[in-house]
């Protein structure tokens, strides 16, 4: 990796693009480390002998209600779902392995199962564990497991897909959204995949295959003959030439922004394909390209990234309902992607509503910011350079933001109040929305 | 520069002197063109000072567009099952749908028609029909739209099946925007609407009108904090992403001033979604406020009924018709009904034959409703000539777009790239 940027810039870049920003103490901890070594550990901690943090949902079974006949069941389930996503957000914010949580969230947007749609929190937790287990492992393994994951079988009707009358909901999205992309398969392929994937059911403990509901007729699928079951469908999909580019494009868009030319994506795809569709080499290739760019192209960050970075910068721990409120108004409530295509795309994060919600959220965050917060201290003393650095803009804020902060600070009745309102403007500023 | 940022850039930098259109107060303030005194655009100020622009006259198309016409688009997202919405009285229908077919005796008759009936949940639509205010389009679709939600949605939004990054309403907003941009001419309620994406015009997206407000930290001077927020937006940075984030600020502040008085009650439950009915109530209020709003887009989702369709579809259509009837009552009592055309859309219909899960998979042609002046049933569900198990397209959806664009005053053919027949 040859980078023209300073190590500190690179540190922020990777922490924002494949993580949820840095807290002041993390910054202190990391900035004197050798960047290449840091990066290696960050992307693939296991390779460097580091331990992977425990599953944040480890105790979920304790609070997910199971007695569906209980009068309070619905209420309990809603509380449990809030609790669950709050635990996940805490982990994203505090983890020592941000790439893992970032990738898990990326796959949540990719497979985009809505906890509300599937109406089973237990299945949803199991699904999140699955995503987390394979988040930077083997894509073919993850795709195979997702295909017969109870949450997915419920979400896209796979459990109702039978030999007698196949339901093509999953078969279509498998090809369009999860592997090849539109234009790389035919309607006949959708039907063939659906038939070959018949017979899977959801049980108390997971998934089972019922041979008497399965259509074992050999199908022609993506040009292969004799495709008739899960294994043969998966084999044809993962060997299709469109898959490496499709997944590389999706991950690259999320890390580098959507302006990357097809020729570069093709290079990523080649690395991905040559490594048996293992994700770490793909991540490394994308990050390496990002760090080597002669000029950094800022991208708009998504609301979860914004909120967690604001918490990290200020040291605030919001409560469950505050977070849920903010994120739902900003259109990105974990566990609730609005449709099978995932969360809304970048420009919706700048909609009139999201912008207003961000401003209001920043106000709540600063009213809870502890007095000793270094971000608050910097704002109180009108030290905009330091404040920008803490917010991840080590070259300073944009001039309009600096001018606006200075005016507001000067017109405030006290430095203490001026510090808080200026911090809220810094957090809601356009600068803090781009990474 | 990306399309998005270019549009926003043009919005902020463009425009000659701001006139007293009553909107864009924050944006005007940013350009130093408004009196410093007006800090928070209150809705009273807005409606009191609002004027309306004159739209171009249509070259074709009766009925003659009214003054200040409005089109409300209701997107039934997920692919509405046209066949169980407008039901053909045809044996082929029943043989294709042994479990989810609706019995003829339950259907709502349409006076004068013996070939179709409406889903029982749609009973309130028969009043519109009887009052010459309902046009029904059977077999609507865009050729080659496909069975993918996303490809078909793109086709319906743009009006083309090739890659087109603008929406058909966005192109109309571009073609007709005045010298002072007004982002409230096109408003989406309940979520983003690619249909409104233009090249130069910008529109406003409000996820949840009842939660759309600004809160400042307790004990602070709200006006100065809001002003500081606004000031971070100008002058625009050369970087497109940063410029886009800057431009979003005045747009948001302007919209808040307006929506604040149009929204229905606050619902504090973060998980509660704004109901379709309450979104349409907000739409009715916006029309009543004379903000020069021309197009409002509202979505109702959940139509992707791959399984257990009967009950789900019933509920969806009930929500749809309740929201629409309530909306129409409101605009009628406010005296605006004559200038409003409401049109339903959905990315595709569903397969004629039901699947094994008491549902239906993605299909092709479907049904659209146009509510407002005019009556008729156009097109057909041609069950004898299915294409891959789907209803064939008998009316190009762009005919309905042409009809709506005529209502708005055109230039229709220019926007659609061709001349499509109108639903006369």
Image (cartoon, helix red, strand yellow):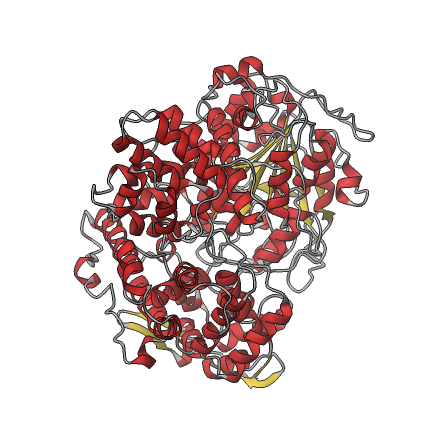
Q: Is residue A352 left or right of residue B73?
A: left
Please tell me whether residue A355 is drawn above or below residue A30 in the rendered image: above
| Residue A281 % position (x, y) | 46, 78
**Quarter of the figure with the C terminus of chain B:** top right
Residue positioned 47% across, 25% down in the render: B257
Q: Quadrant of residue B292?
A: top right
Task: Name the foreground residue: B267 vs B130.
Answer: B267
- Give residue B188's position: percent from left, percent from top: 54, 37
Q: Position of residue A57 (x, y in %)?
A: 24, 63
Q: A50 and B58: which one is in front?
A: A50
Residue at position x 53%, y 81% in the image: A273
Residue A226 falls left or right of residue A133: right
Q: Residue furthest bottom?
A: A226
Residue B27 found in image quarter = top right
Q: Residue at x 58, y 27 (%)?
A: B31
Find residue A150 and report its horizontal and vertical position in percent: 35, 68
| Residue B267 visible to the viewer | yes
- For the question of whether residue B110 can be seen, the reply is no
Based on the displayed image, in which of its 4 quarters is residue B60 positioned?
Answer: top right
Image position of A228 with respect to B411: above or below: below
């Amino acid at each position: 990796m040859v980078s023209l940027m300073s190590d500190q810039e690179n540190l922020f870049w990777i922490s924002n693009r494949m993580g949820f920003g840095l807290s002041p103490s993390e910054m202190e901890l990391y900035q004197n480390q050798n960047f290449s070594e840091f990066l290696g550990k960050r992307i693939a901690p296991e390779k460097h002998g580091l331990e992977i943090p425990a599953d944040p949902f480890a105790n979920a079974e304790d609070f997910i209600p199971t007695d569906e006949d209980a009068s309070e069941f619905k209420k309990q389930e809603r509380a449990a779902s809030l609790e669950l996503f709050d635990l996940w957000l805490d982990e994203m914010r505090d983890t020592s392995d941000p790439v893992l949580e970032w990738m898990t969230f990326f796959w949540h947007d990719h497979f985009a199962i809505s906890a509300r749609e599937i109406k089973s929190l237990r299945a949803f937790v199991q699904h999140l564990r699955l995503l987390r287990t394979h988040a930077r492992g083997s894509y073919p393994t993850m795709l195979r497991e997702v295909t017969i994951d109870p949450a997915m079988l419920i979400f896209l009707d796979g459990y109702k897909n039978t030999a007698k009358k196949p339901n093509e909901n999953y078969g279509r999205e498998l090809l369009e959204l999860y592997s090849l992309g539109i234009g790389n398969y035919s309607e006949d392929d959708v039907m063939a995949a659906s038939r070959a994937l018949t017979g899977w059911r959801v049980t108390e403990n997971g998934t089972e295959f019922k041979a008497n509901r399965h259509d074992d007729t050999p199908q022609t699928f993506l040009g292969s003959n004799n495709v008739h079951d899960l294994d043969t469908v998966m084999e044809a999909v993962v060997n299709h030439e469109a898959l490496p580019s499709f997944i590389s494009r999706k991950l690259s868009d999320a890390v580098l922004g959507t302006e990357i030319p097809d020729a570069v994506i093709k290079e990523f795809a080649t690395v991905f394909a040559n490594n048996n569709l293992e994700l770490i080499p793909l991540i490394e290739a994308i990050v390496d390209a990002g760090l080597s760019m002669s000029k950094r192209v800022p991208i708009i960050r998504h609301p979860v990234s914004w909120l967690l970075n604001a918490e990290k910068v200020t040291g605030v721990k919001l409560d469950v309902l505050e977070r849920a409120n903010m994120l739902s108004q900003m259109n990105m409530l974990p566990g609730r992607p609005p449709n099978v295509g995932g969360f809304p795309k970048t420009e919706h994060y700048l909609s009139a509503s999201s912008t207003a919600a961000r401003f209001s959220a920043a106000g709540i965050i600063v009213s809870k910011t502890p007095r000793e917060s270094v971000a608050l201290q910097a704002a109180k003393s009108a030290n905009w350079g330091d404040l920008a650095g803490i917010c991840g803009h080590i070259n300073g804020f944009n001039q309009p933001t600096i001018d606006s902060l200075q005016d507001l600070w000067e017109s405030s009745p006290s430095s203490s109040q001026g510090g808080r309102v200026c911090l809220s403007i810094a957090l809601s500023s356009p600068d803090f929305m781009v990474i | 520069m990306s399309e998005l940022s270019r549009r926003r850039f043009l919005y902020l930098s463009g425009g000659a002197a701001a006139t007293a259109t009553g909107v864009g107060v924050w944006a005007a303030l940013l350009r130093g063109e408004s009196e410093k005194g007006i800090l928070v655009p209150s809705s009273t100020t807005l409606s009191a000072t609002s004027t309306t622009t004159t739209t171009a006259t249509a070259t074709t198309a009766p009925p003659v567009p009214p003054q200040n016409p409005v089109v409300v688009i209701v997107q039934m997202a997920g692919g509405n099952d046209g066949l169980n919405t407008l039901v053909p009285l045809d044996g082929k229908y029943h043989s294709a749908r042994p479990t989810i077919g609706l019995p003829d005796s339950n259907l709502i008759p349409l006076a004068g028609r013996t070939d179709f009936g409406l889903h029982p949940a749609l009973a309130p639509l028969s009043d519109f029909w009887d009052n010459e205010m309902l046009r029904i389009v059977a077999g609507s679709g865009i050729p080659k739209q496909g069975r993918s939600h996303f490809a078909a949605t793109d086709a319906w939004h743009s009006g083309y099946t090739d890659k087109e990054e603008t929406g058909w309403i966005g192109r109309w907003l571009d073609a007709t925007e005045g010298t002072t941009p007004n982002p409230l001419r096109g408003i989406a309620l309940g979520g983003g609407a690619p249909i409104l994406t233009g090249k130069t015009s910008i529109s406003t997206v409000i996820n949840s009108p009842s939660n759309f407000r600004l809160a400042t930290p307790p004990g602070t001077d709200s006006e100065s904090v809001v002003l500081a927020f606004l000031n971070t937006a100008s002058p625009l940075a050369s970087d497109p992403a940063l410029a886009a984030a800057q431009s979003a600020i005045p747009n948001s502040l302007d919209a808040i001033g307006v929506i604040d008085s149009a929204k229905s009650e606050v619902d504090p439950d973060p998980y509660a979604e704004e109901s379709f009915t309450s979104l349409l109530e907000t739409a009715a209020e916006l029309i009543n406020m004379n903000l020069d709003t021309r197009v409002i887009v509202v979505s109702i989702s959940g139509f992707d009924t791959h399984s257990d369709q009967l009950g789900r579809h019933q509920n969806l259509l009930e929500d749809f018709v309740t929201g629409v009837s309530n909306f129409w009552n409101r605009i009628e009592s406010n005296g605006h009904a004559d200038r409003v055309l409401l049109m339903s859309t959905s990315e595709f219909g569903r397969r004629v034959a039901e699947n094994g899960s008491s549902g239906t998979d993605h299909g092709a042609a479907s049904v659209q409703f146009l509510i407002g002046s005019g009556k008729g049933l156009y097109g057909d569900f041609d069950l004898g000539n299915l294409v891959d198990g789907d209803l064939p397209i008998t009316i190009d959806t762009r005919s309905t777009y042409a009809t709506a664009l005529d209502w708005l005053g055109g230039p229709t053919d220019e926007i659609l790239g061709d001349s499509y027949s109108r639903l006369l």
